[in-house]
Amino acid sequence: MPIPVISATGLWTPPHSVSNEELVESFNAWADKWNADHTAAIQAGEVEPKPHSSVEFIEKASGIKSRYVVDKAGVIDPAVMAPRIPERPNEEISVLAEIAVKAARQSLDAAGRDPKDVDAVLCAASNMQRAYPAMAIEVQQALGIEGFAFDMNVACSSATFGIQTAADFVRSGSAKSVLMVNPEICSGHLNFTDRDSHFIFGDVATAVLVEAEDIAPADHWKILHTHLKTQFSNNIRNNFGFLNRAAPEGIGATDKLFVQEGRKVFREVVPMVAAMIQEDLDALGLQGTDLRRLWLHQANANMNRLIAGKVLGHEASEDESPTVLDTYANTSSAGSIIAFHTHSGDIKPGEKGVICSFGAGYSAGTVFVERAA
């Protein structure tokens, strides 16, 4: 049976970054105008005034200090409070495919792989730009890849689910080289007028090349074990879809964007993920201390601190559980891949680590890897 490995990864970062200070300034200006426009209703007790946000609140709640976005002007304009990305004609490459291709080319170049040698493309992301044709097929076309391609969505766990799917294709002999991309324009589904979540997301694209070991470059990562888990929960939700494109005015407007019950998510996901990783360690005959590094989903610094602590048995250092959340914010499925891409170069042959995601669904995925000798 062919052995799947990770040959290379790629990362595309938008040129624009928004600091917490900039985001807070725009939010507070919007809140002040909203309160002024609704003075009578506020005084009558019919609605609550919009409270201000603050840099201190954001950093304490999340650990986020800044985020990259594809459109900064719209996000920080109090009169807009959303990214403004012009729609492109069908003859032009779509935005999601374009950034996926940029990350994909990096991974292919790093592995020394010609696109024509790739057998399949998976586009795994939280929010697809359209229903069909599949974004993956557009990426396939842009790169000149033959074979097959399809989209998949498991929210923030899309990348780890995508890696296992790619690895399964390799094991079965259906493909020897699979490109998995994660284009995430998360700013497009974020409500920038919600104080409790206006700071959470950023935009990015990542790519992972999964191949059979016999064709992989010498500097690759063995995939030791993968594990996927889902458990239904309404605590993280986005109700946007074609069935509600013409919903009556005033019905569920904000639930067509990202909404969550943050405290419930924290209480329920942390123990679930820590137990899942421990179960995997037991299956591999390993201890938490056998892991050189944990590349965790970049959603919340406090969640990662608790999960890593439960797995390792001690407070994790930045070296053991690196953070990219502070500069990238939550990039959904791409978060753990960014951490792996940017904090794996110093891992020595034979050392092991785990890529782990968790998010809406609930969904969670682990990919245990070992640096090839």
Image (cartoon, rainbow, N blue to C red):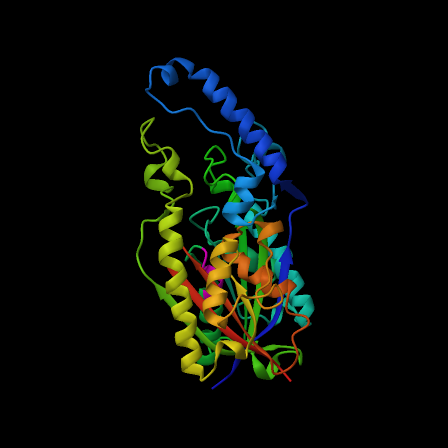
Quadrant in the picture for residue 346:
bottom right
Rendered view: 26 above or below 184? above
Q: Is residue 127 magenta?
A: no
Q: Nearer the viewer, residue 220 or 65?
A: 65
Q: Residue at x 64, y 65 (%)?
A: 343
Query: Residue most toward the front?
Result: 314
Question: So how many labels did they put on this image?
Answer: 0
Magenta stretch: give its range.
156-160
Q: Main secondary structure of the magenta part?
A: helix
Q: Residue at x 59, y 65 (%)?
A: 317
Q: Is residue 291 visible?
A: yes
Q: Nearer the viewer, residue 345 or 112?
A: 345
Q: Nearer the viewer, residue 284 or 70?
A: 284
Q: Is residue 140 left or right of residue 358?
A: right
Q: Residue at x 33, y 19 (%)?
A: 45
Q: Nearer the viewer, residue 122 or 23?
A: 23
Rendered view: 156 above or below 193? below
Q: Is residue 351 left or right of residue 268?
A: right
Query: Residue most toward the bottom?
Result: 1
The C terminus, quarter of image: bottom right
Indicate the position of residue 224 as horizontal and vertical percent values: 50, 80
Q: Is residue 159 magenta?
A: yes
Query: Residue most toward the top?
Result: 40
Indicate the position of residue 197 as horizontal and vertical percent values: 47, 41
Q: Is residue 71 visible?
A: no
Indicate the position of residue 365 as horizontal and vertical percent values: 43, 66
Q: Residue at x 47, y 21 (%)?
A: 34
Rendered view: 287 above or below 15? below
Indicate the position of residue 167 as horizontal and vertical percent values: 48, 74
Rendered view: 21 above or below 174? above
